[in-house]
Image (tube, helix red, strand yellow):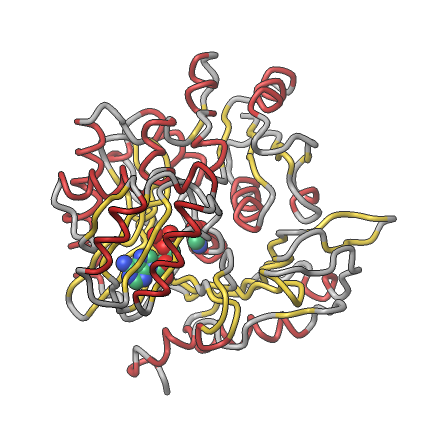
Amino acid sequence: MNILIIGSGGREHALVWKLAQSNSTGRIYCAPGNAGISELAECLDVKADNLTGLLEIVRIKKIDCTIVGPEVPLSSGIVDLFEQHHYPIFGPTQKAAEIESSKVFAKQIMSKYHIPTARFQVFEEYQEALSYLKTQSFPLVIKADGLASGKGVLIAGNRPEAEQALAQIMKEYRFGEAGRRVIIEEFLSGEEVSMLVFSDGKHVLPMIPSQDHKKIGDGDKGLNTGGMGAYSPVPFFKEEQQKLVLQKVFQPIIEGLEKEGRIFKGILYAGLILTGESFKVLEFNARFGDPETQVILPGLMTDLMEIVQASLGGYLDKIELNWHRQSTVCVVISSRGYPGAYQQGMIINGLENLKDREDIMVFHAGTGNRNGRIISTGGRILGVTAWAETLPEAIEKTYQGVNLIDFENKYYRKDIGKKGLSLSPDLVR
Ligand code: AMP
Ligand code: GLY
């Protein structure tokens, strides 16, 4: 089967890498891809939001199945478009993907189907939102409704901060149309974990949970980023609790979406907050996470293409997922300055030191080729990923890998995975 992967980040490199190991894949294409992906797949210079360009690739290259990485093509309706042309594609339709692209829709459907989430109110009028603030205690969370590249969530410690956030979203249109409606919601404290499932619209198959590190600085300090590293599994997120999340979150939401005429096929990702025994959903994403995918897929033993086909065919209940018993850690190396302004075009040295390792994989994100050298082309550049029997060993191995790579203005967090250790004292020897 010829496969097309859409996207250009570490997540897509991990998908291509895993699919290249499948027995049922033939030629693998990626649009637009990156330097690392181009070693495993043919990269085509069409951007992820160019739906007609992507459709053209499917025609010309005789693609048998397309897999979508990022949220933008999903929320623009790529699945609907491909289905109209009878081209198999793995991902939710535009209406189903609204679970990610509209936070208001996500909150409303969670309420309707009794899925545990933070208390909230929706506002369309600035003045009404402003008056509501007077009745609330702080901190509070203010969210723009639509997609805002992960930047549309503002945590306000007091009323002036909340008023400023509302003004930015509703008066200054900082997030454009995405801020036409806002959600004001209760602040939840606890540990955030990511739980992803494959869904065929009726049945769900869970993946091993992971934990992302969204802030730029060690100790979760500083600005939010696309994700600076992850690890999996999460030792303090116990199996019993995972089962409850399946029962109380994934099953009702999948059934709810079906009842609403928005059958969800693809990857459903719940960002959860755990507080002791209880859990709540912070958000849903309609796709694989980045960098979560980089730590989940190395442990997957079942053929990924078989799972994708079972999802498309509606028979996920007929297959079982098998996982290696290992811990996996991914440390993202970025350009210093990210998520603010940063330099591009730096030559990356040392990648050859990690080639052909069976227990380390460097997933590329913002990389390209120039005169036969690999250079940086983005803020998040590489995700060094290593696996070992235990979390402490995987952390150590990953950082050994990080130290073998060198470029100007290299930056990375030094504490990826440490929370997994400190919150699970039984792990530390
Ligand atoms: P979201 O896009 O809704 O997941 O929000 C992005 C980030 O904001 C989350 O990963 C959390 O770190 C934080 N966040 C969102 N909602 C809340 C909440 N109700 N309480 C505390 N933190 C939140
Ligand atoms: N790691 C966060 C996300 O993929 O949205």
User: What is the x, y in percent for residue 424?
Assistant: 30, 78
Can residue 323 be seen from the camera position used here?
no
Horizontally, residue 350 falls left or right of residue 301, namely right
- Specify the farthest residue to the top: 85
Q: Is residue 286 above or below residue 414?
A: above
User: What is the x, y in percent for residue 19?
Assistant: 52, 40
Residue 390 sits in quarter: bottom left
Q: Residue at x 19, y 62 (%)?
A: 136
Horizontally, residue 46 falls left or right of residue 128, namely right
Residue 429 sits in quarter: bottom left
User: What is the x, y in percent for residue 158?
Assistant: 31, 69
Q: Nearer the viewer, residue 421 or 17?
A: 421
Residue 358 sits in quarter: bottom right
Q: Nearer the viewer, residue 409 or 135?
A: 135
Q: Residue at x 34, y 48 (%)?
A: 196
Can residue 52 be seen from the camera position used here?
yes
- Point out the image quarter for the N terminus: top right
Q: Is residue 307 above or below residue 93?
A: below
Q: Is residue 294 above or below residue 428?
A: above
Q: Residue at x 74, y 62 (%)?
A: 352
Q: Quadrant of ligand 1?
A: bottom left
Tell how many labels. 0
Q: Residue at x 54, y 48 (%)?
A: 14
User: What is the x, y in percent for residue 379?
Assistant: 64, 57
- Specify the farthest residue to the bottom: 429
